[in-house]
Image (cartoon, rainbow, N blue to C red):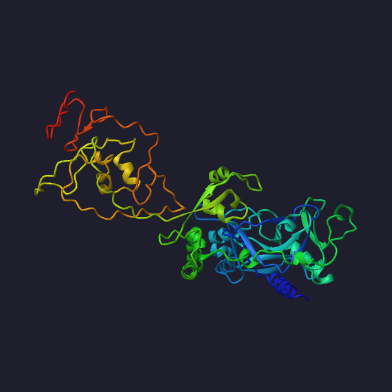
C-alpha cells in the first residue's frame, strides 16, 4: 500500500477517536473544487489533513473563522467547557444515545458562548465547528489542472477548506476498504437527497458506465505529466490559527472562560504568541522592511460580493486578504516604511520673498516658540493643524517660504531638532487623516486644486498680508505694517 495511504489511515483513526483539526483565516487563495453537484469527479492526490473550522462570534461582535488541531489550546478550551458523557435513554436492545454535558449548569453563559456562540440556535456549531479534510485533487470536469500543471484543493463548498466529514467517512468505508489506495482511479462524490430533502454525500469509485459521467472519467494510473503537477502544502492549509490572532479577537471571551473554569488558557496563549513568528495580519512593526498595505480590486467573490459589500459588512482589508473566499477582493501593495523627514533648508531669497531682517537679540520675556496670532490662516486650503496632522514639524513649516506665514514672529535662536518619525497606520483601526502625509525626505503638502499664487505681496489674501520685511500678518485695511512700518511704494 502506498505511503500516502499510511497517512490516510492515521487521519481516519484520529477522526474516529474524536480528534479535531483546524479552519482558518490567514491562508492564501486556493483554486478549489467543491462537491456540491450531483456528481463530482476527480483524482485524489496524496493524503489529506484533518482540521476543525469554526466561525466564532468575537469580542467585536463579528464572526470570524478559526482553525485548530488536536493538541492546540483552542481544542483544550472546547474539551474543557464541552466535556460530555454518552447517556442511553433507551434500552440495551433499542438504545437512544445522547450527549450529556458535564459542566452545562456550572459554567452557565460561558458554556453557551463555546457551545453556540451565546445563542439558542440548535444549528450553531460554536467553537467546536466542523471537521474538514483538505485534499489535493486533479479535477476531471475542466482543464484547469492540465493547463496550469497544478492540483486543486478539494472542498465541500466555497466556504470550506476541506471535504466534509461525511464524505471522508464514506470514502474510507465505501472505497478504501474495498479497493485500497485511491490514487489509481477517479473518485465520484455524489450529492444525494432523501425524501425529506436532507442532503448527504457518498464517495465511490467513479463508474465510467454511468452515461452522464462517461466522458469525465479517466481510466488507469496517473500519467507522468500528472505526477509532475505542483500541489498545495496541506500542512499550511490545515495549520492552527496563530495565538496572536486568537488573542486579537477572543481575549475577553477567554478571560471569561478562565474565570468560570479556573483555567489559565489566556496565559498559555500569551506564552505561545511570544514564541511564534509574527503573524502578518498584526505585524505593524516600524522596523520591518516593508509595511503591508492593501488596495481593492474590481473582482467579486464566488458568492457575488464586491470589496465595498464586504467593507460595509465590517470586514477589514487584512481579514479579506486572509480569507480564501474573499482574498481576491484585495491585492497587497508593499510600500517602504515611513522615514524621518529631513529639515527643510532656508528658502533662497527671491524678488517675491524678500530677505527677513536679522532677528533682534533675545530678551527674558521673548518666548522660545512664538504662538500663532491668527489660527484661521490657510495656505493652499490647509491650516496649521492640517499640516501638523500631516507630519510637518514647526521647524519645517517655519523654513518653508509658503507656510512660514503660520508664524508671524521670528524664531529666537531656535535650533532645528530632528523631525519625528510618523507612526505607521494600524490596519485594524485606521484614522482618517485630515491631510495626506508628506513624502520623505522633504515633506510637501498635497494641494487639492490650489488657487493661483498672488502676483505680488499686495495680492488679495483672505486674512491679511505677511509683511515682506518682518513677516507680520496685517489686515488689508492697514496701509503699512504696524510692526516695522514697511509700506508698499506706489507705482
Q: Residue 123: which quarter of the image?
A: bottom right
| For residue 170, above or below residue 329 | below
Q: Nearer the viewer, residue 222 or 46?
A: 222
**x and y percent of residue 316 in the render?**
52, 50
Name which residue lies at 67% across and 56% down: 31
**x and y percent of residue 196 in the render?**
80, 51
| For residue 396, above or below residue 5 | above
Residue projecting furthest to the top: 491
Q: Nearer the viewer, residue 287 or 25?
A: 287
**Is residue 86 in view?**
yes
**x and y percent of residue 91 in the render?**
77, 68
| Image quarter (top left, top right, bottom left or bottom right) of the N terminus | bottom right
Q: Nearer the viewer, residue 115 or 48?
A: 48
| Image quarter (top left, top right, bottom left or bottom right) of the C terminus | top left
| For residue 440, above or below residue 473 | below
**Is residue 95 in view?**
no
Amino acid at each position: 500500500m502506498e505511503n500516502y495511504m499510511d497517512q490516510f489511515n492515521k487521519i481516519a483513526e484520529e477522526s474516529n477517536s474524536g480528534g479535531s483539526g483546524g479552519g482558518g483565516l490567514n491562508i492564501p487563495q486556493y483554486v478549489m473544487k467543491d462537491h456540491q453537484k450531483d456528481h463530482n469527479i476527480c483524482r485524489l492526490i496524496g493524503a489529506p489533513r484533518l482540521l476543525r473550522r469554526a466561525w466564532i462570534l468575537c469580542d467585536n461582535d463579528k464572526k470570524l473563522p478559526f482553525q485548530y488541531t488536536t493538541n492546540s489550546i483552542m481544542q483544550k478550551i472546547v474539551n474543557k467547557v464541552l466535556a460530555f458523557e454518552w447517556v442511553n435513554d433507551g434500552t440495551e436492545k433499542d438504545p437512544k444515545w445522547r450527549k450529556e454535558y458535564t459542566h452545562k449548569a456550572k459554567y452557565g453563559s460561558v458554556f453557551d458562548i463555546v457551545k453556540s456562540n451565546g445563542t439558542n440556535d440548535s444549528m450553531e456549531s460554536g467553537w467546536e465547528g466542523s471537521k474538514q479534510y483538505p485534499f489535493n485533487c486533479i479535477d476531471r470536469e475542466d482543464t484547469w489542472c492540465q493547463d496550469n500543471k497544478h492540483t486543486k484543493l478539494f472542498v465541500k463548498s466555497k466556504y470550506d477548506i476541506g471535504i466534509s466529514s461525511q464524505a471522508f467517512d464514506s470514502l474510507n468505508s465505501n472505497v478504501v476498504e474495498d479497493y485500497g489506495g485511491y490514487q489509481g482511479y477517479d473518485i465520484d462524490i455524489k450529492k444525494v437527497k432523501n425524501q425529506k430533502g436532507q442532503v448527504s454525500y457518498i464517495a465511490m469509485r467513479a463508474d465510467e458506465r454511468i452515461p452522464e459521467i462517461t466522458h469525465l472519467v479517466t481510466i488507469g494510473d496517473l500519467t507522468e505529466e500528472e505526477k509532475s503537477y505542483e500541489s498545495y502544502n496541506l500542512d499550511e492549509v490545515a495549520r492552527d490559527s496563530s495565538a496572536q490572532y486568537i488573542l486579537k479577537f477572543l481575549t475577553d471571551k477567554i478571560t471569561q472562560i478562565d474565570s468560570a473554569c479556573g483555567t489559565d488558557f489566556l496565559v498559555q496563549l500569551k506564552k505561545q504568541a511570544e514564541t511564534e513568528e509574527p503573524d502578518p495580519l498584526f505585524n505593524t512593526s516600524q522596523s520591518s522592511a516593508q509595511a503591508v498595505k492593501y488596495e481593492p480590486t474590481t473582482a467579486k467573490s464566488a458568492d457575488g460580493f464586491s470589496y465595498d459589500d464586504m467593507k460595509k459588512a465590517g470586514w477589514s482589508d487584512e481579514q479579506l486578504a486572509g480569507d480564501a473566499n474573499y482574498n481576491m477582493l484585495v491585492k497587497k501593495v508593499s510600500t517602504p516604511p515611513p522615514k524621518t523627514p529631513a529639515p527643510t533648508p532656508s528658502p533662497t531669497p527671491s524678488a517675491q520673498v524678500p530677505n527677513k531682517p536679522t532677528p533682534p537679540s533675545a530678551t527674558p520675556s521673548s518666548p522660545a516658540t512664538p504662538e500663532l496670532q491668527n489660527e484661521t490662516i490657510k495656505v493652499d486650503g490647509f491650516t496649521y493643524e492640517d499640516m501638523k496632522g500631516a507630519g510637518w514639524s514647526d521647524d519645517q513649516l517655519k523654513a518653508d517660504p509658503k507656510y512660514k506665514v503660520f508664524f508671524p514672529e521670528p524664531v529666537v535662536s531656535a535650533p532645528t531638532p530632528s523631525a519625528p518619525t510618523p507612526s505607521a497606520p494600524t490596519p485594524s483601526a485606521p484614522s482618517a487623516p485630515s491631510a495626506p502625509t508628506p513624502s520623505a525626505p522633504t515633506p510637501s503638502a498635497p494641494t487639492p486644486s490650489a488657487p493661483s499664487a498672488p502676483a505680488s505681496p499686495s495680492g488679495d489674501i483672505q486674512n491679511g498680508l505677511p509683511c515682506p520685511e518682518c513677516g507680520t500678518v496685517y489686515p488689508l485695511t492697514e496701509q503699512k505694517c504696524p510692526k516695522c512700518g514697511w509700506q508698499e511704494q506706489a507705482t
